[in-house]
Image (cartoon, helix red, strand yellow):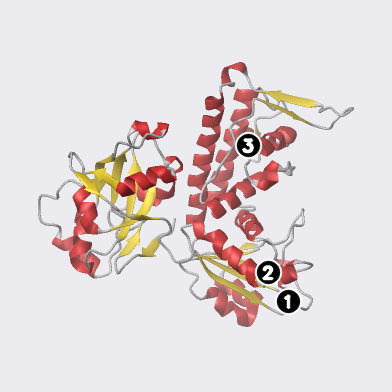
Amino acid sequence: MRATEFITEVTIDNVKGAGATPYNQDIDYFGLRVKMKPSIFLKLALPLGQPHSAELEKYIADGGAIGSPFLEIKIPPEWDDGDFSKFAQVAGHEGRNRITAVKKLEGDEPIEVHLIPRGGLRARDLTAEFVEKMQEGMYAEKSTHLVSGPLFVSGSLDEMALSTYKTFGDFTKPGPFQGPDKKLVPHPKNIEKATKFFEKTPYDFRLFFSHIPGTGKYSEHGPMTPEEIKKVFGPQADAILQDSEDQITVVFVGNKGDRKVMLTPWMMAHRFGHAIQAGNRGNRGWSAWGEAEKHFFTTINSTLGEYYGKVDRGPGSSYMGRPKSEQMNNNLTPEYNALFNAIGTQRSSRSGEIRRPYEFLYELFAQYLGTGKVTLNPLPSNLTYGRKAWGNPSKYMNIKPEFRDESERAHASEMLAGDMQMMFDDVLSNSVGKIFVM
């Protein structure tokens, strides 16, 4: 998530700010970010019982960043059944000193506060009805006192996640972009759609599109240093480099791909995934994308074996120094494709277009950027796939009897989706300040 956000005058840094916790860093997985008045926060949390820290107050006054204060919320179990007659209760807190100091310095202006549900619930479980009921009122911590709402304002805390959309070159003349993209990329409607698409991510993006002749040869280059940017883009380099330190910058130099699709906002996000991966080629060190990829295929390989009995019987247990269980296995490509077309909820899966397993990972990444979450269908109880003979599929994949229960199959998918959300957030966090050329 975005490391630094300005809500009023106080700086919120959910990674390095004073009091920041892992919950703050991954709040879009663990809970809900809202804008709440300090006075309301202090009514909901246990009383401080002592003067707030003068040292902390001076730190904030001098521009020091803080992690968002948060409240832990106990959700009534009846809400799961649609019964909202009971109110939620605050069950824990962090940040009374911080928010008291902010109130004294900045007044009772709303700042970013995080609401974290207890009982194993996550952000994906907080339906619109849940949020509306919490906003209506909650019982104060260890109290029967109901604090009436509206308690907060939910939704995006930022004006715009896409801060820059800029084109270079004359799109009426020959250059890296071809066909419909020459009209689509600079079209105001596409700019509007891109702005809307990226508003769900808590990171600031800057998108550039170079139609300058000669820049297309750098397609899928990945991260570039400032020196490389100056060499490749010449007079336009200053615009690319300016304000790039705390944002994610992507420069598209055409739209090359094995399956030619117009550069819509979804494809921009998909291709951005390729740009990140391009930076990992030949790099055996740690990378956030590499970890996400490893976890994804480790889970999928385990799922195919445990749930469906599909295991690669080929020789060797490792490849390129890594266990086969952690990598995409070419021998299981038909099984991957069948499964990904079944569990994917995005258009390419719904229409059965996943034919290369790695593309599904990029599609999930695009889904996360565009919706703020990863959504998967339950594991299918049976699948038919393969080249058809006499109109019938040639291969079958049936789930083992002990996993046929739909709730069991749905839980497996939800766990993977939640894991990928956290790992994709790590990917974005590690992309801040970098310039990717795609």
Residue lying at the far left in this picture: please name it.
50
> Would residue 194 be found to the left or right of residue 75 on screen?
right
Q: Which residue is mark 2?
A: 185
Q: Amino acid at mark 3?
A: Ile
Please provide percent x and percent y for residue 199: 51, 60
**CA distance for labels 1 and 2:** 9 Å
Query: Which numbered disc flags the more N-terminal residue, 2 or 3?
Result: 2
Q: Amino acid at mark 2?
A: Val
Q: Which residue is mark 1?
A: 171
**CA distance for labels 2 and 3:** 31 Å
Q: In the image, which disc is placed on residue 150?
A: none
Please provide percent x and percent y for residue 15: 37, 55
Circles 1 and 2: CB distance less than 8 Å?
yes
* 182 in relation to 420, above or below: below
> Would residue 41 be found to the left or right of residue 152 on screen?
left
The local secondary structure at tag 1 comes to: loop
Query: Which numbered disc flags the more N-terminal residue, 1 or 3?
Result: 1
* 337 in relation to 372, above or below: above
Please provide percent x and percent y for residue 324: 64, 34
Q: Tell me the crowding category of disc 3: few under 14, some 14 to 19, or many 20 or more residues within 10 angstroms, Cα based.
A: some
Please provide percent x and percent y for residue 427: 52, 52
* 181 in relation to 237, above or below: above
